[in-house]
Amino acid sequence: MSHQSQGLNRKWTALQPVDEDRRSMPFKVYTQRDLDKIEPLARLPEAMRFEMRVVSTVLPFRVNKYVIDELIDWNNVPADPIFQLTFPQRGMLLTRHYDRIAALLSQGADKAVIEAAANEVRNELNPHPADQMEMNMPRDEAGNRLDGIQHKYRETVLFFPSQGQTCHSYCTFCFRWAQFIGDKDLKIASSEAETLHRYLRSHTEVTDLLFTGGDPMVMKSRHLAAYLEPLLHPDFDHVQTIRIGTKALSFWPYRFHSADDSDDLIHLLERMVMAGKHVAIMAHYNHWKELDTPAARAAIRRVRSTGAVIRAQGPLIRHINDDADVWAKMWKMQVKLGIIPYYMFVERDTGARNYFEVPLVKAWEIYRDAMQQVSGLARTARGPSMSASPGKVEIQGVTEIGGQKVLALRFIQGRNPDWVQRPFFARYDDKATWLNHLEPAFGEKSFFYEDEYGQIRDEKLAVVPGSK
């Protein structure tokens, strides 16, 4: 068979009907104003429904009919992991924050008063962790910040298309929750494809471009194509990998096989692959249940038929997946379905972190116990990893050196590439949940990277003449 025939045959395969799994349901979404319209909630106590109203006044809430009907076991609510993943819970707010908002709602306070109080609470929740706004967003020659672009690591640029700044459903733990509360000052978005393309032309060190959000897969395929197709020009030969971060394979799998423009999306992915780009769908999975519906499996098959690779990542989160058996089962299912396990993250220090965070030591124990249950093909998942301001820091284990119990750490990525893969050690602390809770081992005053990181941070935060 000729190479041309192989290509035609491959496209034919990618666009075949997905049998009974191609059947869809209308996309119907619910937000806070629609809580009373979600039929299964009527079976829950009124007090619990009020708690949802309180929490969703502060933190964003959005869920769709597929999640409600296909992923949540309503006989296991509130313990069901997908219910915890998508519906507000009282513990997601500190008691003082909850009581303040609850009192205003009970009193029938003016909408503006409630929103002002909610904004004050949000500002205490570290809306943009790891210096995202201050250190990751590059500037042009005049010193103006390039909204919609983040460039933290040398080889990788993140792009936030404005058409993709929402999701089919919201995760309750989302570290980008500040994108979804209607505050334009907290959004990271760009609608100018030329801004992105101009930046990439002048930064030939960039090999990987990550489209993120929100969720780029909420975009129409023609909008996504306007960003992607120009990257096939020789000017962008240095951009080898196109990554698309998405939860759509979990929250709206019909996007890939039953939407009006799903064929256009599949064609687009295939064109990028056939032109020589490595296309990686960075799928966010938090529980094996998200892989276990006919619609989800049909979507996975269809994406893989284009030649795109699916890599799975997600945080370790209390109430949802803080169990080694859950991770082991999820990784096994991913490998069986042709997905590459990629990252286990640590819950970030933002939003409802107090409800979701797991101590670093426990996170490592869960990771280790899960790894012991799977074959080598599933041991591609790195972690537990903290996406902190200095870089991605992996907890490699607990050990004893010179009579001192320590945590062994290393950088997977760093603001200075020289930090990558360098081991360092922290004093054992079974309560620490983030990098800044750890202290250097062996009597050292600081970790090896801290002085240089401080200099980098000072330079980034310095006032730039003419900046906005």
Image (spheres, grey):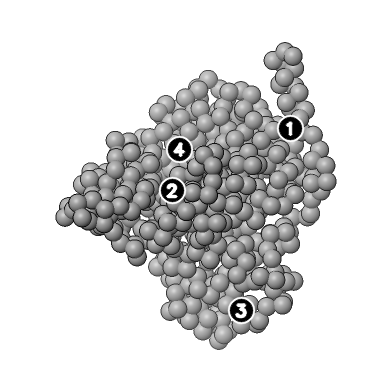
How far separated are the C-alphas under marks 2 and 3?
Answer: 35 Å
Q: Position of residue 371 (x, y in %)?
A: 49, 48
**Tag 1 residue:** 14
At label 2, counting other C-alpha atoms closer than 10 Å, the crowd grade (few under 14, some 14-19, many 20 or more) is many
Which of disc 3 and disc 2 is earlier in sequence?
A: 3
Residue 48: numbered disc:
3
Which residue type carries mark 3?
Met
| Alpha carbon separation for disc pair 3 and 1 | 45 Å
- When asked about the image quadrant of residue 124, the answer is bottom left
Tell me the tag on residue 383. 2
**Residue 379 x, y percent position in the rendering:** 50, 42
Q: Are marks 4 and 2 in contact (CB under 8 Å)?
A: no
Quadrant position of residue 161: top right
Disc 1/disc 2 C-alpha distance (Å): 33 Å
Residue in the picture at 54% in, 53% down: 327
Answer whether residue 177 is visible to the viewer in this image. Answer: no
Q: Is 282 placed left or right of 120 in the picture?
A: right
Q: Amino acid at mark 4?
A: Val
Q: Amino acid at mark 1?
A: Ala
Circle 1 SS class: helix
Mark found first going from the N terminus, 4 or 3: 3
**Separation of marks 4 and 2 at Cα, in angstroms:** 22 Å
Say whether disc 4 or disc 2 marks the residue closer to the N-terminus.
4
Mark 2 and mark 3 in contact? Answer it, CB < 8 Å. Answer: no
Q: Nearer the viewer, mark 4 or mark 2?
A: 2
Distance from disc 4 to disc 1, alpha carbons, whole Å, reads 29 Å
Q: Earlier in the sequence, mark 4 or mark 1?
A: 1
